[in-house]
């Protein structure tokens, strides 16, 4: 019979090997789900290293428990340690958040994994005028309770906690970015107006920021939590022509009608290290219907050469919706772009000559669709002729206008789509997720683009090619650190490449380009915010 904190093995069936009860660690993983069967896919995505604790709202049936036992046995073969028996909350409705919070206090995880708080519909009931959700309601309830509990838990412990919401039905073998309901930014380190670097990442309690004290100094402050709304655990980071940093996310708020609504929000960082501006709502393309609006995709954004801000999201119908803000602050209405159904993976980037475009991975095929404007005031037009065939969770913008990076779905190798030339392979088929890059780095007198990506088991790999000449090839090397998020790369105030990772202990680590006689070399890694309360 299940009881809080543990359960017994089935009669006549030996329990799979697990570690002893979860130790009090600050770098472990907590998987919080509705029933034991829901933990199977999340366990499959775990890699060796931290201890994994499992929390279930309900004990589930015998088949679910057996499936979990098999998943735990598989974890043991892969070197993933599962701590003790799953904790079963058996909490009453309305008290799940408190139960999850108690479990987090006991497990003390650095990372919390749960399912999608707003699962996608499978059909639409025209008579009732509401979407049909196949997922059991408890799954979404537990996910929302977990996000709320993790937010409180981080504020209590005053150190970062990171939440990952696994999209229902996503294949864990594709990697965390491909399975994420709220994606991590591919670009999260930027150079401010004064030449100082800043890093931004989402956490359970809000956006974390680290700031370089002096330009190119290697001394940093942070992390600190930026004041703002209770965001869902994702982030988009965009920089305008003036060097100002714009942050985009999703928030869920409870309105006067007592129901929760989801909308896109945005804030601006004008000066490095200074408070950000107020968070403003950008709205929701399905905002008039709460049930539809809660499924809105994560925002992508870009500025064109005229200073117009373009925001794109995947809408309820799996199309793309966009709205534009002019330099004087005036917003247009939402416009729906139609072509083919798309997945929740959009990349907005500058286009030639001075415009903007958005790429989206197709929902029903290994292809992409691109929308571009027919002139500065023209209509958005679709282009489905590209040869890009991306693996899920790998799209990212390259520095050159209209240029896209991705991993090829057939081989996982890194590719770049060069307009007029087609796909170019950059090798690097190990690992998963998007590739970051920064152009204009001097390497032995050549202007080069430095790249960073996740390799095997999250190891950070770094490479470079001549600016505008990816066909010249990339030689990748192991940078000597692992990262819990896609590695980032930026150019500091002295023109040197800086590579950033989030270490296995949740701390920011950076390595800077070092002048050498040949090739690209990095200094030793430094750790930022080793003992900082937030």
Image (cartoon, rainbow, N blue to C red):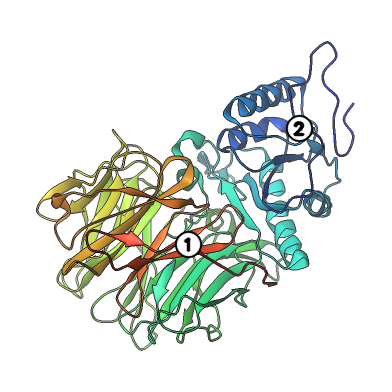
| Helix, strand or loop under label 2 | loop
Residue reaching furthest to the front: 517
| Helix, strand or loop under label 1 | loop
Q: Quadrant of residue 428?
A: top left
Which residue is found at the position 65% from the left and 43% from the top?
A: 50
The one of 327 and 469 positioned closer to us in this rendering? 469
- Bin the neighbour count of mark 1 within 10 Å (Cα to Cα): few under 14, some 14-19, many 20 and up: some
Q: Quadrant of residue 349?
A: bottom left
Q: Earlier in the sequence, mark 1 or mark 2?
A: 2
- Give the image location of residue 237, x and y in percent: 43, 69
State which mark lies toward you, 1 or 2. 1
- Give the image location of residue 132, x and y in percent: 57, 41
- Looking at the rendered image, the quarter that the N terminus falls into is top right
Q: Is residue 69 left or right of residue 323?
A: right
- Give the image location of residue 490, x and y in percent: 36, 68
Does any portion of residue 83 appear in the rendered image? yes
Q: Does 152 sit above or below residue 82?
A: below
Residue at the disc numbered 2: 19
Which residue is found at the position 79% from the left and 49% from the top?
A: 24
Picture disc at residue 494: none
Residue at the disc numbered 1: 525
- Bin the neighbour count of mark 2 within 10 Å (Cα to Cα): few under 14, some 14-19, many 20 and up: some
- Looking at the rendered image, the quarter that the C terminus falls into is bottom right
Does any portion of residue 356 appear in the rendered image? no
Residue reaching furthest to the left: 420
Q: CA distance from mark 1 to mark 2?
A: 32 Å
């Amino acid at each position: 019979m299940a009881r809080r904190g543990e359960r017994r093995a089935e009669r006549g069936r030996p329990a799979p090997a697990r570690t002893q009860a979860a130790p009090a660690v600050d770098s472990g993983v907590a998987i919080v789900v509705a029933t034991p069967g829901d933990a199977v896919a999340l366990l499959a995505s775990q890699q060796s290293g931290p201890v994994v604790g499992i929390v279930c709202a309900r004990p589930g049936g015998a088949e679910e428990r057996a499936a979990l036992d098999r998943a735990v046995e598989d974890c043991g073969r892969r070197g993933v340690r599962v701590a003790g028996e799953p904790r079963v909350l058996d909490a009453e409705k309305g008290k799940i958040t408190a139960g999850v919070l108690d479990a987090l206090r006991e497990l003390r995880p650095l990372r919390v994994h749960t399912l999608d708080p707003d699962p996608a519909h499978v059909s639409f009931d025209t008579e009732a005028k509401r979407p049909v959700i196949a997922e059991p309601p408890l799954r979404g309830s537990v996910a929302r309770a977990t996000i709320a509990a993790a937010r409180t838990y981080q504020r209590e412990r005053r150190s970062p906690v990171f939440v990952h919401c696994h999209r229902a039905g996503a294949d864990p073998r594709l990697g965390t970015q491909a399975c994420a309901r709220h994606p991590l930014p591919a670009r999260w380190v930027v150079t401010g107006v004064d030449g100082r670097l800043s890093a931004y990442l989402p956490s359970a309690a809000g956006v974390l920021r680290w700031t370089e004290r002096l330009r190119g100094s290697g001394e940093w402050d942070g992390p600190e939590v930026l004041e703002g709304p209770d965001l869902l655990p994702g982030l988009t980071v965009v920089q305008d022509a003036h060097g100002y940093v714009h942050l985009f996310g999703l928030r869920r708020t409870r309105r006067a009608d007592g129901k929760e609504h989801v909308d896109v929000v945005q804030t601006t960082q004008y000066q490095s290290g200074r408070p950000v501006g107020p968070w403003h709502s950008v709205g929701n393309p399905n905002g008039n219907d709460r049930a539809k609006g809660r499924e809105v995709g994560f925002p992508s954004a870009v500025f064109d050469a005229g200073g117009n801000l373009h925001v794109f999201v995947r809408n309820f119908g799996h199309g793309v919706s966009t709205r534009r803000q002019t330099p004087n602050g005036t917003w247009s209405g939402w416009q729906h772009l139609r072509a083919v159904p798309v997945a929740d993976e959009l990349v907005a980037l500058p286009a030639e000559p001075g415009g903007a475009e958005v790429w989206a991975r197709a929902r029903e095929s290994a292809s992409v669709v691109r929308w571009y404007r027919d002139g500065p005031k023209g209509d958005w037009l679709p282009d489905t002729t590209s040869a890009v065939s991306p693996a899920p969770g790998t799209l990212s913008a390259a520095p050159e206008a209209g240029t896209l990076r991705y991993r090829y779905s057939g081989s996982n190798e890194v590719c770049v789509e060069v307009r007029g030339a087609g796909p170019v392979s950059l090798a690097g088929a190990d690992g998963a997720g998007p590739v970051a890059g920064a152009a204009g780095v001097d390497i032995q007198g050549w202007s080069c683009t430095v790249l960073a990506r996740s390799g095997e088991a999250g190891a950070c790999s770094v490479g470079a090619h001549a600016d505008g000449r990816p066909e010249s090839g990339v030689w990748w090397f192991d940078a000597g650190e692992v990262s819990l998020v896609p590695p980032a790369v930026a150019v500091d105030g002295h023109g040197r490449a800086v590579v950033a990772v989030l270490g296995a202990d949740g701390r920011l680590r950076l390595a800077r380009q070092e002048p050498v006689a040949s090739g690209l070399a990095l200094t030793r890694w430094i750790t930022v915010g080793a003992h900082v309360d937030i």
